[in-house]
Amino acid sequence: MKFAIVVNEGPYTHQASDTAFQFTRAALAKGHEIVRVFFYHDGVNNGTKLAVPPQDDRHIPNNWAKLGKDNQLDLVLCIAAAQRRGILDEKEAKRQGKDASNVIDGFRISGLGQLIEAGIEADRTVTFGD
Amino acid sequence: MSEEMQQEADGKIKKFMYVNRKAPYGTIYALESLEVVLIGAAFDQDVSLAFIDDGVFQLVKNQNTTDIGVKNFSPAFRALGDYDVNKLFVEKESLDERGLSSDDLMELTWEDEDDDWEEKPSIQLVSRQEMKTLLGNQDVILSF
């Protein structure tokens, strides 16, 4: 089955991102396809490369990035939501005249159309959030 | 988006329902939901919106946010008709539970090109039971 995953909450405050991660990993292990993981609302904060959680805790952004890399997942941060919350890739930072960018390798920034497209493409769209 | 995906996505029409459950202010969910609806309108899908729980407050008329310093985005709902988004289902029980009636809601309309561009109401009141059926009939549900 083809799944689209939507993550609507940021890391650590909510369980949503952890559960989405575990669901995605389990679906892949069962041989399902993940069309896309789309991060919206505070979910875009899962794509920061500046998170430094305590060493005995899980590193949520890194875990996503590694899962994405190992399985060639399309991890997309909504551009409108990301810009509001100070999540910028290098290209966007340059365009906005900012002196820093903070999107972790393995994620990309794109528009809300990617969410709709994933919903059309997938057999099931599964949302994780509040 | 990839060309291959775009081609595959073209021609597929799915039933999308955006479920609005939260008050318009206090959290950003309602505003960012409307942003998805407006972008999604370009994809020519079969779109409807559901308003349940505190989500019904999103459609209340004469919203004034001056004192909370947040943008009043409710006028944007009026644009939905122009994007062929004209099925807004409001759960009657949710209105009742909050002391609201249809008189408290904005008058949202769309022009029916198959009926001499007659202006028709976009908002339909449905019962909780009917809402359950509507939700069950969808291909994609995005809940905010």
Image (cartoon, grey):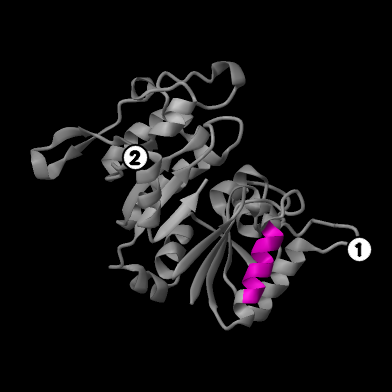
Which residue is the site of mark 2? B88
Residue B121 in view, yes or no: yes
Residue A47: x and y, percent? 68, 59
Q: Tell which subunit mark 2 falls on.
A: B
The residue positioned 39% from the left and 56% from the top of the image is: B136
- In which quadrant of the rendered view does residue B102 lie? top left
As measured in the structure, the alpha-carbon distance from the residue carrying label 2 to the one carrying label 1 is 48 Å
* Res. A55 mark: 1
> Residue B43, relative to residue B86: is it above or below?
below
Q: Which amino acid does label 2 sit on?
A: Leu
Q: Tell which subunit mark 1 falls on.
A: A
- In which quadrant of the rendered view does residue B120 lie? top left
The residue positioned 39% from the left and 32% from the top of the image is: B92
The residue positioned 53% from the left and 20% from the top of the image is: B65
Neighbour class for label 1 at 10 Å: few (<14), some, many (≥20)? few
* Res. B59 mark: none
Specify start and end residues of the magenta stretch as a single range.
Answer: A17-26
